[in-house]
Amino acid sequence: MGQKPCCESNANKKNLINQNDSNTLVNGTSNQDEKQETPLINQNPSSSTLGQSNINNLDNSVASLNSYNSNINPNYQCIQTFTAHNDKIVSLIELSSGNIATGSYDNTIKIWDIANQKLLTSIQELGHVLCLLEFEPNLLLSGTDDNSIQIWNINNPNRCLFSFESHLLWVNCLVKCNNNYFASGSNDSDIRIWNWQEKSCVNVLKGHTNCILAMIGLENGNLCSGSADLTIKIWELENGNCIKTLTGHSKWIKCLYQLSNGYIISGSDDKTIRIWDNNYNCINQLTGHERSVRALCQISDNLFVSASFDKTIKIWEIDSFRCVQNLIGHQANVICVLFHTNGYLISCSTDHTIKIWKN
């Protein structure tokens, strides 16, 4: 395999790809949250229809502040709202240029100058864009519901440069490892490690028994994955071994993030956020969301954010794990959150919109 892959640290990225890195799409769904849209492994929950959203008057967003700690006192307000896609937005990343990329069920990837709400590039995909990863400047990877991973040149978006095709079901997660490797997670329950230069799969990590719904790279070089099998697994990429399995969530794990203190936070369909310390022990369980927790990111040394299918975004204090602000404005499920390097909090939703929040 040559040079061994090791995951690139997420501690300073303040972004989710799954969290993927980012940012990860979950197309496996629990019966109380979303319409079932994909075949599952060892699970067949009943489905419920996701109601249609009214996206009028979205600028009436409010941020309700609970002043638990006057020293923290965040006061994020929505400063911009714009319709970005013709269907729900399910992936969001910041590019090295400072622009953002979004992926949608309208089968497009869009590149935005977020400061000016200007669309720079639109890439037409063959399927729903479930996850995105910038592997190199201007080179973008996308995972879709056609079971493949595509490479796109942002400056020449009219054709796909290459397609990785080994997964058997939807590709939900993409994570950059070291300079020559990346990882993908799928509904086929496998994590595949890919050699970027050789364009080949060099390892398959097996252990989960249901869809891989979230993945992040850890600061120590390991990989962390969350699944519809209700477990979180820690993997050593040098040998492909699972070194730890974390249990506690009662429903599917939808998102993962590593805080700057090394702790891992996980969000689930069980409506909770769990906090895992550096020894992978669960030290706290946060409640407050009324539906599935779908995305997580850190916005300061002592604050992180959670986004939920309950249409809200919550800001939590890391030291005390108390909710210190509740952001209300999206008219449907909030799927993605990102803390941009310009200091803005950016959110995307199934209401087709992007919202920009400023403290």
Image (cartoon, grey):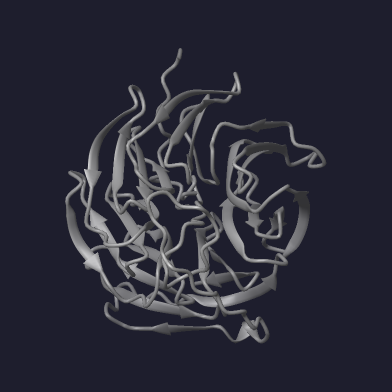
Please count the marks in the image.
Answer: 0
Q: Is residue 57 above or below residue 205?
A: below
> Quadrant location of residue 204?
top left
Q: Say which quadrant the N terminus sits in.
A: top left
Q: Residue at x 39, y 83 (%)?
A: 65
Residue 190: % across, % down? 43, 37
Q: Residue furthest top?
A: 2
Q: Is residue 343 above or below residue 101?
A: below
Q: Residue at x 49, y 73 (%)?
A: 48
Q: Is residue 163 above or below residue 299?
A: above
- Choose between 311 and 322: the one closer to the eye: 311
From the viewer's perspective, tell me whether residue 89 is left or right of residue 261. right
Residue 352: % across, % down? 65, 70
From the viewer's perspective, tell me whether residue 79 is left or right of residue 316. right
From the viewer's perspective, tell me whether residue 237 is left or right of residue 247. right
Residue 71: % across, % down? 29, 73
Residue 154: % across, % down? 74, 42
- Choose between 243 and 325: the one closer to the eye: 243
Q: Residue at x 71, y 54 (%)?
A: 107
